[in-house]
Image (spheres, rainbow, N blue to C red):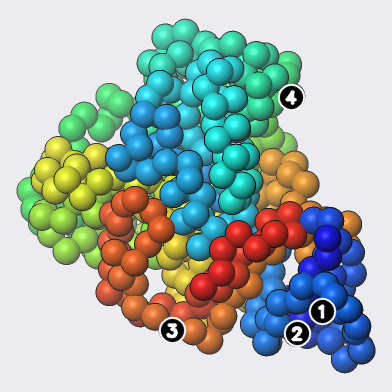
Amino acid sequence: MSLWIKNGNVWNEGTKRLESKHIRIEDGIIAELLDSGADVDTGSADAVDAGGKLVSAGFIDMHVHLRDPGFEHKEDIITGTRSAAKGGFTTIACMPNTRPVIDKPETVKYVVDKAKNAGIVKVLPYAAITKNELGRELTDFAALKEAGAIGFTDDGVGVQNAQMMKDAMALARSLDMPVIAHCEDDTLVEGAWASEGEFSRKHGIKGIPNESEAIHVGRDALLAEATGVHYHVCHVSTEQSVRLIRLAKSVGTKITAEVCPHHLILSDENIPGLDDANWKMNPPLRTPRDVQAVIEGLEDGTIDMIVTDHAPHSAEEKARGVDLAPFGIVGFETAFPLLYTKFVETGRWSLGFLLEKMTKDPARVFRLNTGRLEVGAPADITIVDLESERTVDPADTLSKSSNTPFGGWQLKGWPVTTIVNGNIVWSE
Ligand SMILES: NC(=O)N[C@@H](CC(=O)O)C(=O)O
Ligand SMILES: [Zn+2]
Ligand SMILES: [Zn+2]
């Protein structure tokens, strides 16, 4: 089975420029990258004419919620992977806060099998650190790894007990597996939903302080140093967390981190008011100073990658009012256009920098055999029309949910074709 992608613009990190290429794919593998000046005879093979659009390694998203099993009214593996493909993602790693929680080998296998049968994008499941994510008892790490889990996390909640976290890290280390942490100290949050900042003061509501996140980052950095585990920090949102990760990296701790588009682009001061729960997510939108800090953290390599934390919730759940609505926003389909428009079009980042944070760097950190546009690599490829400009319409989505604060934003750089293992899995 061969497939050609002709006249694609491929980023060259050496020259820092886009270069026009033809790509030949054989049996799901990139077989050849040719200068587009070269004469090629594609014979009877299928060919996609990229027509000068960007051709990149497929995007990788190491933090997503597919809600399956148990919360299929929000999303399921089929709709979630379709939405991911529409956003240009070819590999995603899903969180275990489902119902039941992914804390048993059978549930890991359920996700792996359903994703494989759907055959859309590659799905890598995380399994829970503690049974039912209750923080009381460790899961069976060895059996979960055997079933296909790629790491352990209680995302959705922080592991409150330090000894429990240390035991988890020691066990994960012995199995050469990473621990991925949602950093949040419950005692510092209690009932609040917005950050402590301009917004909470103006509206006279209780705020979530930055320390609620950073205290876990600091604690866990020390525990990671002590145990030697690969420790990965979820959705970094505060200046203090960036500072602590930078310090831990400087002493050689195996610590890595991720940041979401919304924490790079929005602060608490953008929240329009108290009546739209599409601005409620965890961690909350922090202050402008924190936004600057996470941007700088990503730029200097303290933060390794960008993830969406795609967290679908139904319109009915989000309509319960800000206090009762669940935390979280969808993210797949707007991630690249948001980042391209806000950071590349403005000249702050090179296109190559953005692509690295969504392809090569997550692959490096989690040792994935994808994320590079090279001969011999799996043909996981995204084609993006960097010139196309569109207004975000939350209803226009392949996800079951449309909970986004970005409705109405005018963005450039929309994915048009997504290819996984040489198969076109989504096309506009
Ligand atoms: N990010 C969120 O606001 N919500 C996530 C949980 C999480 O990522 O912590 C969810 O599962 O809805
Ligand atoms: Zn989380
Ligand atoms: Zn999450």
Instruction: Check disc 1 and report the residue beneath it.
Output: 22
Find out whether the residues at labels 1 and 2 contact each other: C-beta distance under 8 Å: yes
CA–CA distance in space, label 1 to label 2: 5 Å
N-terminal label among 4 and 2: 2
Find out whether the residues at labels 4 and 2 contact each other: C-beta distance under 8 Å: no
- Asked whether residue 350 appears in the rendered view, the answer is yes
Q: Is residue 257 left or right of residue 75?
A: right
Instruction: Check disc 2 and report the residue beneath it.
Output: 7
Disc on res. 110: none
CA–CA distance in space, label 4 to label 3: 44 Å
Mark 1, Cα crowd under 10 Å, few <14 / some 14-19 / many 20+, is many
Q: Is residue 142 above or below residue 360?
A: above
Mark 2, Cα crowd under 10 Å, few <14 / some 14-19 / many 20+, is many
Q: Residue at x 51, y 77 (%)?
A: 413
Instruction: Check disc 3 and report the residue beneath it.
Output: 389
Q: Residue at x 56, y 80 (%)?
A: 385
Q: Report the amino acid beneath label 1.
A: His
Q: Is residue 370 above or below residue 211?
A: below
Q: Report the amino acid beneath label 3.
A: Glu
CA–CA distance in space, label 4 to label 2: 42 Å
Instruction: Check disc 4 and report the residue beneath it.
Output: 176
Q: Report the amino acid beneath label 2.
A: Asn
- Which of discs 2 and 3 lies nearer the camera? The answer is 2
Residue 117 at x, y = what percent? 60, 40
